[in-house]
Amino acid sequence: MTQFEQQGVVEALERSIKNSKHLRARHSAAIAAARALARKIDAWDVIVEWALDDAAQSKGRPAVPANDNVSIASFLKYLDALGLMPEDEEPAATRGRPASRPPAAGSVPAPSSNKVLAFRKKAASG
């Protein structure tokens, strides 16, 4: 079993990008967006701590919410769009939702307007 060192989201993303063999220059925009979101996720705890300290000093409410309900879900969508999610398992954040995976090889795909699946198909074709 692989041992994973504890690291930030930015470091983990860079490791995944470095070890992927399918990413090309045309993925640059999605990679840049994923990097920006990874930096935000890594910085969130620090930002919340600052806001809580400020609120304690002013005896008011924090300037930012204590949690962020969208960044990690959005980040996982970027990973999926870039083909960096394992194909044989679902991420814990999406269990309970219907999977939106492309049909198995050899089957006739139904027409889809899902932009993520279209991106993945285009990325896989070269």
Image: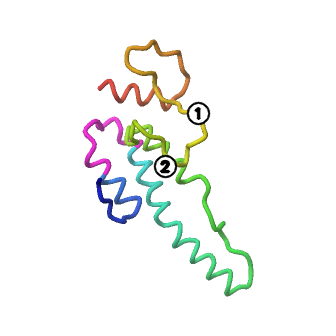
- Residues under labels 2 and 1: Cα distance? 18 Å
Picture quadrant where residue 2 is located: bottom left
Seen in the picture, residue 47 relative to 78 is either above or below; the reply is below
* The residue positioned farthest toward the top in the image shown: 108
Marks 2, 1: nearer the viewer: 1
| Magenta part, dominant SS | helix
Residue 119, compared with residue 33, is above or below; it is above
Q: Does the magenta stretch include residue 77?
A: no
Q: Specify whether 81 is left or right of 22.
A: right
Query: Is 126 placed left or right of 41 in the picture?
Result: left
Question: In what element is the residue under mark 2?
Answer: helix
Residue 21: image x %, image y %?
A: 25, 39
Magenta-tinted stretch: 16-30
Q: Which of 90 and 75 is in front in this view?
A: 90
Q: Where is residue 83 in the image (x, y as percent from the top left)?
A: 38, 37
| Residue contact at pointers 2 and 1, CB within 8 angstroms | no
Q: What residue type is labelled 2?
A: Phe
Q: How many numbered circles does the render carry?
A: 2
Tag 1, which secondary structure?
Answer: loop
The three-letter code of the residue at mark 1 reads Pro
Residue that mark 1 sits on: 98
Q: Read off the residue under disc 2.
A: 75
Question: Where's residue 12, x and y in %?
Answer: 35, 56
Residue found 36% across the figure and 53% down from its top:
13
User: Relative to residue 58, is residue 100 drawn left or right?
Assistant: left
Kindly identify the residue that appears in the image at 32 percent across and 54 percent down: 14
Within 10 Å of disc 2 (Cα), the crowding (few <14, some 14-19, many 20+) is: many
Query: Which residue is at a point 41% across and 30% down the rendered structure image?
Result: 120
* Residue 59 higher or lower than 66, as above or below: below
